[in-house]
Amino acid sequence: MRTFIGIDLGSTTTKAVLMDENQAVLGRGITNSRSNYDVAAAVCKQEAKIGARFTLFKNALGSGGGAEILLEDLERNFRLEQFLSELNQLEQTCENYLDHPRFKDMKSALREALGAVFRQIETEAPAIYAPEADRKSDFFRDIAGSRFMDIAERIGRESGISFESLLNIYDKSIIDVESLVHSDEVVSRQLMNGLSRALKELEGVEVSEADAQAALKKVIDLELEETYVVGTGYGRVRLPFPKEHIRSEILCHGLGAHMMFPGTRTVLDIGGQDTKGIQVDENGIVVNFQMNDRCAAGCGRYLGYIADEMKIGLHELGPIAMKATKTTRINSTCTVFAGAELRDRLALGENRADILAGLHRAIMLRAMSILSRSGGVTDQFTFTGGVAKNESAVNELRKLIRENYGELTINISDESIYTGALGGAAFAYRAV
């Protein structure tokens, strides 16, 4: 099967979208790999292919007979298989680091402590991927890292092993494991093992085991030919393919927003390092745009810095800000000075939720300025990028749009983080 792939290399995550010859999106992939852009591109492309195989398997099963339940359980069990495989690689890599001369005198004790840590994580894994389990992240690094820290600290204390030594070995090893891209053969085995696990657990599914295995095997054996790949985003110059396959972020986000919402005329994209105001015509072609200056003030990284200052997760900022009873006036969206202002206001006894509400409003005021310079806001308006998932940011944006431009259609997709990659895939399709 001929496929067309768009890859968006961002500063915090890398995304890929894979579409078929009918421009139907078959799969999406995302990674937070921090190794290098080559690896990140390969990992998210493999993830998009996995997503495509799930879509094709869904099409093969059809609807009814419990097919939806089987698909949900297959994906959950496949992710469990994937996690256990990467956990095994992480343990082996950690053991390899024990051969370093600095660990010579405590090699045996470290091996025993690491074994205990990994057996504990392994035992917990089924619960982490159980139905309805609440995971703050789906990335291996986040899940494994969080559990390793908690368990290693306790085991290190009980066994008299330095926690810093265990952490040092983990930090070196996780980078190596993130640099590994699973081969198609490994992914195929994980999919078939995931299906076996799912079929053992499920009741009330009318699809027979033999039929399900045959359908999945047929999907796995189908070659997904990379007919054309287009790259965009912050790290596009590092993509491992020719310059002819590269498009600017502005063009890809404009076209991607048009493909998601064909009535789009104005696009706001807030990513990790920049904010873009884009005007497009009825075909998704960019007619004007404006971006922020060179610094990351008012962008996703700014929110990440604030979350670090408050020692909370990035995903917690929006919900906390939504509890505000008033909006504190924030004087600067400069990432450098934000921490100092934040600490000053907390020291004065101001409410944390009110301060965060003010920070979100300050970010959106800056975005509105960029939109104004790009040509204003025209119906329909589409908001994309990772910040579009922040409910407080969306709430402030809606209020400012209404105050300045009246009632307009505001489009926000659950898949908005893939907008640039979608535009890239569309350019790949048009290039052939």
Image (spheres, grey):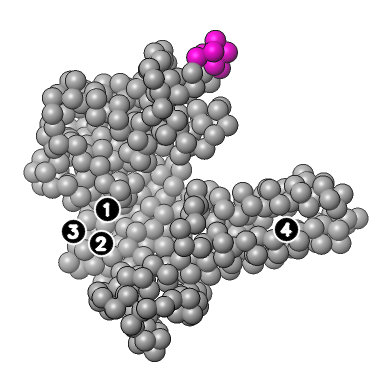
Label 3 close to label 2 by CB (< 8 Å): no
Q: CA distance from mark 3 to mark 2?
A: 15 Å
Rendering coords of residue 96 (x, y %)? 74, 63
State which region is magenta. Answer: 343-350
Q: Residue at x 66, y 56 (%)?
A: 173
| Quarter location, residue 59 | bottom left
Work out whether residue 242 or residue 350 is closer to the camera in this orientation and state it. Answer: 350
Mark 4 surroundings: few (<14), some (14-19) or many (≥20) residues within 10 A:
many
Q: Dot 1: what SS?
A: helix
Mark 3 surroundings: few (<14), some (14-19) or many (≥20) residues within 10 A:
few
**Is residue 98 found left or right of 245 in the rendered image?**
right
The dominant secondary structure in magenta is helix
Rendering coords of residue 353 (x, y %)? 45, 24
User: Which residue is tagged 2?
Assistant: 25
Q: Which mark is residue 117?
A: 4
Label 2 close to label 1 by CB (< 8 Å): yes
| Quarter location, residue 364 | top left
